[in-house]
């Protein structure tokens, strides 16, 4: 299983039966994935969503967006709870306007789930932690 390090973005191979959250990065020696949403820049986005062999949940947000900020603790909580099922990332759309228009992000917060670089599902609007988790579960269940 290939997992991109959430710190240095090096691609690591995780042996079968091991979890990304238990793996140490061969390059920077930090835990590859700690269940804390990873801030992705526009240039890091493509690699992180396409080179990971785990689904990637992305929160598209902006600093001026009240509902985005209100949802951040719930998102962090769900990321920790679901860290062995998916990777979680955040994209600040103010710093990634090209990406936002490329993906046709019309309102924020928007949550989207990617698998092998392809978008599987998305939802717009803030959700409380339990609904967030339910929505992510159903999105993951659509994957082969
Ligand atoms: Zn690393």
Image (cartoon, helix red, strand yellow):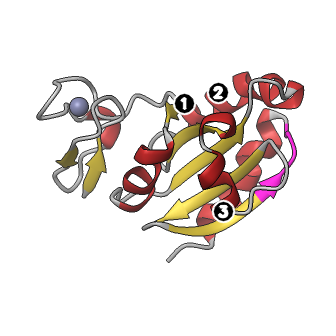
Q: Which residues are magenta?
A: 123-127
Tell me if 17 is positioned left or right of 27 in this view: right
**Near-viewer residue (48 or 43):** 43
Q: Position of residue 39 (x, y in %)?
A: 51, 32
Answer above or below: position of 89 versus 64. Answer: below
Q: Position of residue 30 (x, y in %)?
A: 24, 23
* x and y percentages locating residue 13 in the rendered image: 17, 51
**Label number found at residue 77:** 2
Q: Which mark is residue 103?
A: 3
* Mark 3 vs 1, N-terminal side: 1
- Residue holding disc 1: 80
Q: Residue at x 75, y 24 (%)?
A: 63
Q: Mark 3 and mark 1: span between their CA atoms?
A: 26 Å
Task: Name the element at disc 3.
Answer: loop
Q: CA distance from mark 2 to mark 3?
A: 26 Å
Q: Residue at x 75, y 51 (%)?
A: 134
The image quadrant of residue 127 is top right
């Amino acid at each position: 299983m290939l997992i991109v390090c959430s710190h240095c973005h090096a691609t690591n191979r995780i042996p079968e039966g091991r979890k990304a959250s238990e793996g140490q990065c061969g390059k920077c020696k930090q835990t590859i994935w700690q269940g804390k949403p990873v801030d992705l820049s526009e240039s890091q986005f493509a690699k992180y969503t396409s080179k990971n062999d785990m689904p990637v949940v992305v929160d598209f947000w902006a600093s001026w967006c009240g509902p985005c900020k209100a949802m951040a603790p719930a998102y962090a909580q769900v990321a920790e709870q679901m860290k062995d099922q998916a990777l979680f990332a955040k994209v600040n759309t103010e710093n990634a306007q090209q990406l936002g228009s490329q993906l046709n992000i019309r309102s924020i917060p928007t949550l989207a789930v990617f698998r092998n670089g392809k978008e599987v599902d998305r939802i717009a609007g803030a959700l409380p932690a339990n609904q967030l988790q339910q929505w992510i579960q159903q999105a993951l269940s659509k994957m082969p």
